[in-house]
Image (spheres, rainbow, N blue to C red):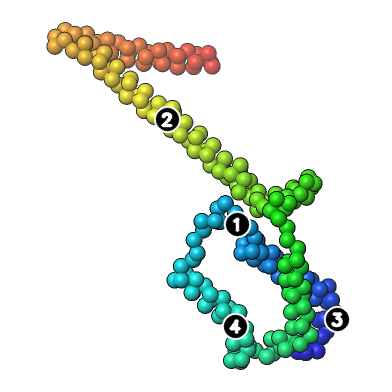
Amino acid sequence: MGEAVKAFWVTYPWQVVTFFLVNGVTAFGLTRVFRLVFLGKPQPKTRRTPEVIWSMALPMVALSVIVLLMPVLMKELNLLSPINYEYLNNLLAEILLVISGGIGCMVGALIYLPRTGSRSISLPVRFVQDLLAYDFYIDRLYRVTVVFTVSLLAKITAWIDLYIVDGAVNLVGLVAVISGQSLKYNVSGKSQFYVLTILLGIAVLATVISYELVIGHWSLFISK
């Protein structure tokens, strides 16, 4: 396994350089965040910020210590397979990791960018800063696409339900009410009126049937 680790260093040097570079940049960022949060000037919203109570601070500190000591504990308890984790015994890699992290912490401690000067004047740089600050505008894109589409569909559905579905139902009800109000005046209680109504209905029905028969015979006559 040691030969495999050495071969990796020789075969993939750019990956090794990238690994140590990421380690240094991470240390730089964490150091800068620590300076901005704990060592920077008080901001208007941080002057009255209360300290965390002990019931929250104690578990957080305890878990932080456990996380930091977990690799060492696992190594001492032989919980790490020596075949898969033999690279942890590489002294040169450990020294380079410590050096890259130390350089990152040192640079982060020496270079302090104030909040007022963190925004660039250059438009391309400002665009990149805003792109990263607003998470690539994913929330705005989501609001413009998904939220707008759902809202538009909801408005269209509400309009259809209000003016078409409810309108048709209300129209049927209105026709029924008007018809009932109109027909109630025709109820006179006299048998002559009822007989006249029946005769008129029979006459209309006979007219319709006769019209269909005449049209049918006329069509047959023309086709012959």
The three-letter amino acid code for the residue at tag 3 is: Val
The three-letter amino acid code for the residue at tag 4 is: Leu
Between marks 3 and 1, how big is the CA–CA gap? 49 Å
Q: Is residue 7 left or right of residue 60?
A: right
User: Can you tell which of label 4 and label 2 is closer to the viewer?
Assistant: 4
Between marks 2 and 1, how big is the CA–CA gap? 56 Å
Task: Find disc 1 in the rendering and name its residue.
Answer: 42
Q: Residue at x 77, y 78 (%)?
A: 99
- Per the image, label 4 sits on a secondary structure element best described as helix
Disc 4 to disc 2: CB gap under 8 Å: no
| Label at residue 69 | 4
Q: Residue at x 76, y 83 (%)?
A: 95
Report crowding for label 1: few under 14, some 14 to 19, many 20 or more residues within 10 A (C-alpha): few
User: Can you tell which of label 2 and label 1 is closer to the viewer?
Assistant: 1
The three-letter amino acid code for the residue at tag 2 is: Leu
Q: Is residue 220 left or right of residue 177?
A: right
Earlier sequence position, callout 1 versus callout 4:
1
Between marks 3 and 2, how big is the CA–CA gap? 73 Å
| Label at residue 10 | 3
Name the image quarter holding residue 28: bottom right
User: Can you tell which of label 1 and label 4 is closer to the viewer?
Assistant: 1
Report crowding for label 4: few under 14, some 14 to 19, many 20 or more residues within 10 A (C-alpha): few
Report crowding for label 2: few under 14, some 14 to 19, many 20 or more residues within 10 A (C-alpha): few
Between marks 4 and 3, how big is the CA–CA gap? 31 Å
Report crowding for label 3: few under 14, some 14 to 19, many 20 or more residues within 10 A (C-alpha): few
Q: Residue at x 57, y 51 (%)?
A: 44
Earlier sequence position, callout 3 versus callout 2:
3
